C-alpha cells in the first residue's frame, strides 16, 4: 500500500489561498476584477478595520443565476476560459477560476447576486456552505467577506499595521480606477470616503480625483504606436516628483501590471530631467494583441511576459522623452461640487 493521498478540495483551496489571498488588498483586487469582468459601471468598496473585519464590494454587473452562484466557489470554476485556445488570448482580468474558492476558504462570505430576474443569497464559512436562499432581484452582486483569516491564525499574525493594510487597499482601488476610467469607483473605510472617481472615461479627471487637481495640472499627455503596441497616458513634469516608485501605473490591455523593464524605460526617458532619488507620476496605458502577452506567470496575475518587448520599451522611451520636453499641459477644471 502506498502512502500518497490526493488532498480534498478544502485543503487544496486553503493552500491555493496562500498564494491568491496574501492580504486584504488581494481580496479587494479579486472582487473588483470580477466586478469589472461582469461589465459593472459602478463599483463600491467598503472596508472595516482595513478589510480584516469586513470587505464588501457592490457592483451593478451581470450577476449570477442560482446555479452559478454556488458553482462559482468551486476550485477551477470560471466562465471566462473554455479551452486552451482562450488561454492564449485572455481578454478578461480573471481566468484561473480560483479566487472565490480561495477567499471562501479563509473567511466568512455572504453574497447576494442577481442577473435581474430572481436573486440568490449564499453564505459560506471556511469553504463550507451554510445557506443558499432566494434574495431580492437587484441586478449585480453584493459580496461581503468578513473575519478574514479567522481560520488561518498564522496568516493573520502576518498582517502589517492597519494603516499599512489600508494603504494597500487604497492603492489597489486607485490602480483599478486608472485601468477602467469609464467605471465609477468609490472606496469607503470605516465609514469615511477615501477614493471617488467619476467614471466619465477621462483619465486626466481620474488623476485629479485620485492624486489631486494640482498634480493633474502638471501632467503632460502622450500617445504613440508602432506595429505591435499602442501607448497613451500622462506623465508629470519633472518638477512634480515623488520619493518612491508607487505613483507609476502601468496597464497592459487594461490590467495593472508590475514590470521592472517598463518602469526602467520610463525612468530612462526622463533621467536627464529627474533629480536623483525622485520619481515621476505616470499612468501608462498599453494596448496590444492579447496573443503577444502572457499573464499566466503567477497566481496574482501581476506579472506579464511580452512578445517584442524591446520595441515597446523603445516606443515608451521615445514618446515620453518627447512629451516631457514639449511640456504641453492640459487645463483641468475644478469639478463642480
Ligand atoms: P475567475 O475570475 O478567474 O473566473 P473567480 O473565482 O474570481 O474566477 O470567479 C468565478 C466565477 O464566478 C467567474 O468566472 C464569474 O463567472 C463568476 N463571478 C464572480 N464574481 C462575479 C461578479 N461580481 N459578477 C458576476 N459574476 C461573477
Ligand atoms: Mg476572478
Image (cartoon, grey):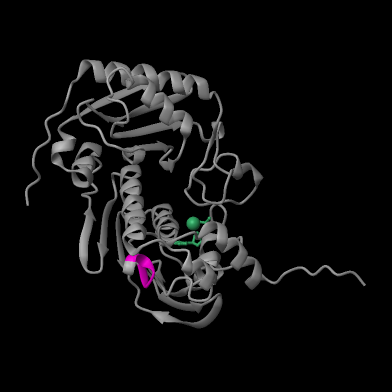
- The range drawn in magenta is 50-55
334 vs 318: above or below: below
| Residue toward you, 225 or 279 | 279
Left or right, 313 with reference to 239: right
The quarter of the picture where residue 254 lies is top left
The structure residue drawn at horizontal position 51% and vertical position 66%, both measured from the top left corner, is: 155
Left or right, 287 with reference to 196: right
For the question of whether residue 225 can be seen, the reply is: no
Q: From this viewpoint, which residue is outermost toward the right?
A: 1
194 vs 260: above or below: below
The structure residue drawn at horizontal position 52% and vertical position 35%, both measured from the top left corner, is: 290
| Residue toward you, 268 or 255 | 268
**Residue 120 at x, y = what percent?**
43, 76
**Residue 223 at x, y = what percent?**
31, 24
**Residue 282 at x, y = what percent?**
30, 33
For the question of whether residue 117 can be seen, the reply is: yes
- Say whether residue 326 is magenta: no
81 vs 44: above or below: above
The quarter of the picture where residue 325 lies is top left
The structure residue drawn at horizontal position 11% and vertical position 30%, both measured from the top left corner, is: 331
Of the 4 image quadrants, the one containing the N terminus is bottom right
| Residue toward you, 43 or 103 | 103
The structure residue drawn at horizontal position 16% and vertical position 25%, both measured from the top left corner, is: 329
Q: From this viewpoint, which residue is outermost toward the front?
A: 276
**Residue 30 at x, y = what percent?**
45, 57
Count of numbered labels shown in the rendering: 0
Amino acid at each position: 500500500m502506498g502512502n500518497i493521498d490526493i488532498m480534498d478540495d478544502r485543503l487544496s483551496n486553503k493552500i491555493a489561498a496562500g498564494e491568491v489571498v496574501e492580504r486584504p488588498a488581494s481580496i479587494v483586487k479579486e472582487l473588483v476584477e470580477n466586478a469589472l469582468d461582469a461589465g459593472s459601471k459602478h463599483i463600491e468598496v467598503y472596508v472595516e478595520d482595513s478589510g480584516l473585519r469586513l470587505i464588501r464590494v457592490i457592483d451593478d454587473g451581470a450577476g449570477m443565476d442560482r446555479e452559478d452562484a454556488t458553482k462559482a466557489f468551486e476550485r477551477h470554476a470560471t466562465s471566462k476560459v473554455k479551452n486552451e485556445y482562450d488561454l492564449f488570448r485572455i481578454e478578461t482580468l480573471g481566468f484561473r477560476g480560483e479566487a472565490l474558492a480561495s477567499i471562501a476558504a479563509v473567511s466568512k462570505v455572504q453574497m447576494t447576486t442577481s442577473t435581474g430576474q430572481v436573486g440568490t443569497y449564499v453564505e459560506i464559512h471556511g469553504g463550507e456552505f451554510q445557506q443558499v436562499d432566494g434574495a431580492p432581484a437587484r441586478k449585480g452582486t453584493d459580496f461581503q467577506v468578513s473575519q478574514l483569516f479567522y481560520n488561518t491564525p498564522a496568516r493573520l499574525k502576518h498582517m502589517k499595521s492597519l494603516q499599512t493594510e489600508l494603504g494597500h487597499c487604497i492603492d489597489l482601488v486607485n490602480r483599478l480606477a486608472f485601468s477602467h476610467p469609464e467605471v465609477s469607483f468609490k472606496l469607503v473605510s470605516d465609514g469615511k470616503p477615501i477614493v471617488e472617481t467619476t467614471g466619465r472615461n477621462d483619465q486626466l479627471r481620474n488623476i485629479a480625483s485620485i492624486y489631486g487637481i494640482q498634480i493633474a495640472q502638471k501632467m503632460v499627455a502622450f500617445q504613440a504606436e508602432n506595429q505591435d503596441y499602442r501607448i497613451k497616458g500622462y506623465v508629470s513634469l519633472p518638477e512634480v516628483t515623488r520619493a518612491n516608485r508607487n505613483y507609476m501605473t502601468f496597464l497592459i490591455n487594461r490590467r495593472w501590471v508590475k514590470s521592472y523593464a517598463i518602469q526602467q524605460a520610463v525612468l530612462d526617458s526622463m533621467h536627464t530631467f529627474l533629480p536623483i532619488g525622485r520619481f515621476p507620476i505616470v499612468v501608462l496605458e498599453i494596448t496590444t494583441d492579447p496573443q503577444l502577452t502572457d499573464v499566466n506567470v503567477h497566481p496574482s496575475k501581476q506579472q506579464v511576459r511580452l512578445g517584442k518587448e524591446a520595441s515597446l520599451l523603445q516606443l515608451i522611451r521615445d514618446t515620453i522623452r518627447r512629451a516631457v520636453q514639449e511640456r504641453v499641459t492640459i487645463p483641468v477644471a475644478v469639478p463642480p461640487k
